[in-house]
Amino acid sequence: MSEALTAGKAGGEASVTDSDVLSASISLQPIRRPWGSIAPARLAALQIRLTILEQAKRAGVGHVGSALSVADIIAALYAGGMDVADPDAPNRDRLVLSKGHAALALYAALHQRGWLTREELDTYCGDGSLLGVHPEHRLRGIDFSTGSLGHGLAMGAGAALAARLQGSSRRVFVLLSDGECNEGSVWESAMFAAHQELSNLIVLIDMNGQQALGYTRHVLDLEPMDRRWDAFGWDAQVVDGHDVGAMLDAIDRLDPVTGPPHVLVARTTFGRGVSFMENQIRWHYFPMSDQEYERAVDEVRAAE
Amino acid sequence: MRRAFVQELAEIAERDARILLITGDLGFSVVEPFADRHPDRFFNAGVAEQNMVGLATGLAESGFIPFVYSIATFAALRPYEFVRNGPVLHQLPVRIVGTGGAFDYGTAGPTHHALEDVGIMRMQPGLAVICPADAQQTTSALHATWDLPGPIYFRVGKDETTCVAGLDGRFRLGGAELVRDGTDLLLLTTGSIAADTVAAAEALAGEGVSCAVLVVATLNPPPVEELEGALARFPVAVSVESHYVTGGLGSLAAEVIAEAGLRCRLSRCGVRRGSEGISGSEGWLAAQHGLSVEGLMSSAREALAQGCLTS
Ligand SMILES: Cc1ncc(C[n+]2csc(CCOP(=O)(O)OP(=O)(O)O)c2C)c(N)n1
Ligand SMILES: [Mg+2]
């Protein structure tokens, strides 16, 4: 953990970091909501946020708001929502991070699970690293390279169909952004998945209300999002994308064996957790100054 | 270059009401000069590039001159068939503006690296393909072509400041510009790597190797006669482009040499390997593919060492 992150903590350098605690506890857990409590997932979300800030600052890159927006969704998936006990198990659940520009949130979760080492994480956006701005399928635990919006759901539907054809119980999760739903390809896949009744396909939409050049309601109005998916034949529901407990409950209740594919329309706040980033278009782009970084870390820590 | 492009477009739009700018939800801190001055002629089509090109086709058919804007991969590749069956088939004045060639979006990775855009666009008959070398040439290229009756693909880089020495913004559609003369070797180049090509030529001059540099900003219509004339003067030529070696400038040069039966050995500098998933800065990635100034210099030396064709 960086000096800046540990500096404010009592105990300082030698203290056991959140990240150590989490990777130890989480990687020992068996599958699917093992704790009977949402506390570990909440802690995972906190740690994901801190890692996002730390690594974005270290690498001097942007997309911070986009990653913070999905920190709780990713935490819910990796700390209970998905069966991801073993990255190499052929029948573990799959995640397609279709909004690939939030890869940093995913790397943070993979690090927590122990699939990415600290050293690997610290190469984020460096020359010669596999950890770029967008996810790379050559990384352990990542199945699909993304970065071109509108591609992920098609690959996810294919992976869900493959699971069914192979008689596997694995589920495929696809995380879409709301701006991404502008792409016609998303709706082509939506029709196919519903027609094929891919019950093992679970889409989460990061409904943060903004895209690269404006707020979605000003660019292309997407509402009512849940009813659109419903009309396409999906099992659609709205969830609070920052309430990990609610998301875990919702995922638990989905039927992955029979019936239509599922979509959780997750209401989120872009930049969630850092007040000056929330709902600000420019935080799609800007790297943080030293001051901004410190404020951001303080706010995220104080929230817990 | 992209900022220079939008600035100039905003100027031209002042004089011609047919100009429209449509973005695929990109261009933060780039498109504002146009959007602010011509809010009624600026549209964000959302993250929907196929639709954007289809819309532009319909608009052009009714007399408008729509410019559609996105990152080069998303502007050129995602809607490619809509380009083919739209502005190309109908011969309409749609302008596709792709920003950032090759590794301009370095750490963003392979989905953002346009390495075949020029090649696929060059294959379409009647589609002009323009890759300006610097901001000044971007401005003059737009100035010279905005009201062309047929469609255009522009590949514009992100560098706004670097100037290609000796170019002075010169541009002719279907032409090529000699920015430096020499006697030993001809360097052909296009797009934003032109500056590094000139830098390599300058450094090679220090070693006693005299290189001419020809900047080919128009890939279509190809400047066949000018290329023939230049290639006929040299026993060895090296093409330099931030693109796959197949399909772009190197391929064009090879076609010209073969079809004119020239006695010139061509060596092509460009990207030869597919993505290995490795991320990095623009400069680092370019160097990995032999496209740094040093890489270009050693390719030029090797080409010279191999020598000319024997009879
Ligand atoms: C096909 C395609 N077009 C354009 C882009 C460029 N781009 C990256 S993110 C983005 C939109 C951002 O909005 P949203 O998708 O809602 O993500 P958020 O910032 O809310 O995380 C765009 C247009 C892309 N990555 N892929
Ligand atoms: Mg969004």
Image: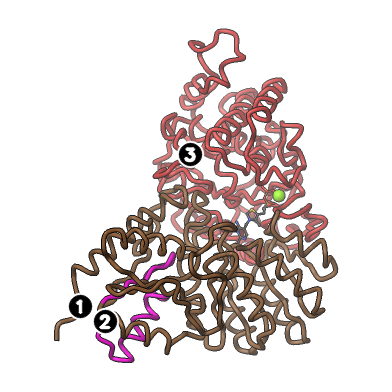
Chain colours: A red, B brown
Q: Are marks 3 and 2 on the same chain?
A: no
Chain of the residue under label 3? A
Chain of the residue under label 1? B
Residue type at tag 3: Tyr
Q: CA distance from mark 1 to mark 3?
A: 46 Å
Locate residue B282, reporting x and y percent.
Answer: 47, 52
- Dot 3: what SS? loop
Q: Of the residues tagged 3 and 2, which is closer to the observer?
A: 2
Q: Is residue A187 at least partly visible in the picture?
A: no
Q: Nearer the viewer, residue B40 or A198?
A: B40
**Residue at the extreme right of the image, as rendered:** B40
Q: Is residue B101 at least partly visible in the picture?
A: yes
Q: CA distance from mark 1 to mark 2?
A: 7 Å
Q: Where's the N terminus of chain B, which quadrant?
A: bottom right
Residues drawn in magenta: B236-263
Q: Quadrant of residue A286?
A: top right
Q: Are marks 1 and 3 on the same chain?
A: no
Q: CA distance from mark 3 to mark 2?
A: 45 Å
Q: Are marks 1 and 2 on the same chain?
A: yes
Is residue A180 located in the magenta-colored stretch of the structure? Answer: no
- Dot 2: what SS? loop
Locate residue B93, reporting x and y percent.
Answer: 68, 84
Which mark, residue A124?
3
Does the beta carbon at disc 3 come under 8 Å from ligand 1?
A: no
Which mark, residue B264?
2
